[in-house]
Image: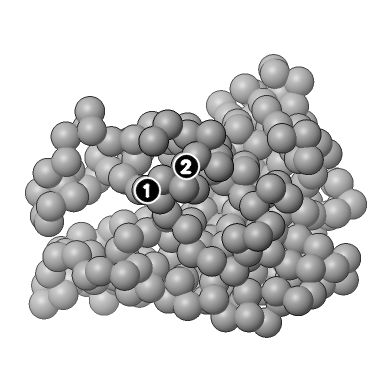
Amino acid sequence: MSQLSDQVIIVTGASRGIGAAAALELARNGAKLCLSARSASSCSGILEQIKNAGGEAFAASCDVSDYAAVEKMIAETLDRYGRIDALINNAGIVDPIGEIATSEPEAWARNISINLVGVYNGTRAVLPHFLNQNAGVIINISSGAAHGPMEGWSAYCSGKAGVYMMTRATALETGEKGVRVYGFAPGVVDTDMQGTIRASGINVVSKIPREDLAPAEDPAKAIAWLCSEDASDLAGQELSIRDETLRKRIGLSV
């Protein structure tokens, strides 16, 4: 994927899980990276791996639910690299897990502020730059939970359903202006979030044995591929890693 050489890509929630794996994969394909997380120091391990392999990256502290913080992170990236080519809206949380009747309103709202408003904030902050250069890629990390309710996940399902509509709305508004927007559902992946889900014991996802979870490297490869021109014909769509045709195009086992 030499098309990613010198591309400048922001990954939110880059300190662990899918975000960290995506950052490593993008760096292997030549991208320059802004690793965004609530604490920049939490990205130190990933940053060190990228630099030791000859890649270029920096870490930025950013709470995606805070628009001013997102604007600052975007500005830092532009100051350092002069451009931005792609934004991976990956940051997200699953908590609170539990029934609506006993849920904590502040925790429920916090979930929405990260999972949905955070995607809006990133999109809003980067779009003027993308529209000005008539090019850019936005990948919103989605979930099967966007389309089917799950017991105990009312906040998570609601937020991801909102991200699905935001992806479609953004694509509708910008698709003819050089901006490619994708929703991408990575499947059930072996991350810290899945550890939280298993510990809850709520709904069928919590019962999936860890050995049956997909490695984070699979969605990472998909994210890197979506950043390339090879995926341009799929712009505007919500894609699932479970789709066999898509997996073949990416080069994943079927």
* Count of residue discs: 2
Task: Specify the amino acid type for callout 1.
Answer: Arg
Q: Earlier in the sequence, mark 2 or mark 1?
A: 1
Residue name at image x 76 percent, y 40 percent = 4
Q: Name the residue under label 2.
A: 247
x and y percentages locating residue 88 in the rendered image:
60, 54
The residue drawn where x is 71% and y is 76% is 174
**For the residue labelled by badge 2, is the local secondary structure a helix, a strand or a loop?**
helix
Q: In the figure, residue 233 lies in which quadrant?
A: bottom right
Instruction: Residue under label 1, please give it.
Output: 242
Labels 2 & 1 near each other (Cβ < 8 A): yes
* Residue in the image at 77% along x and 46% along y: 8
Front residue of 235/56: it is 235
The amino acid type found where label 2 is placed reads Arg
In the rendered structure, find residue 208 and report the number of the disc placed on it: none
The answer to whether residue 63 is left or right of residue 148 is right
Quarter assignment of residue 108: bottom left
Residue 222 higher or lower than 109, as above or below: above
Between 58 and 159, the residue placed more toward the observer is 159
Q: In this view, does 131 lie above or below 143?
A: below
Q: Can residue 64 be seen in this view?
A: no
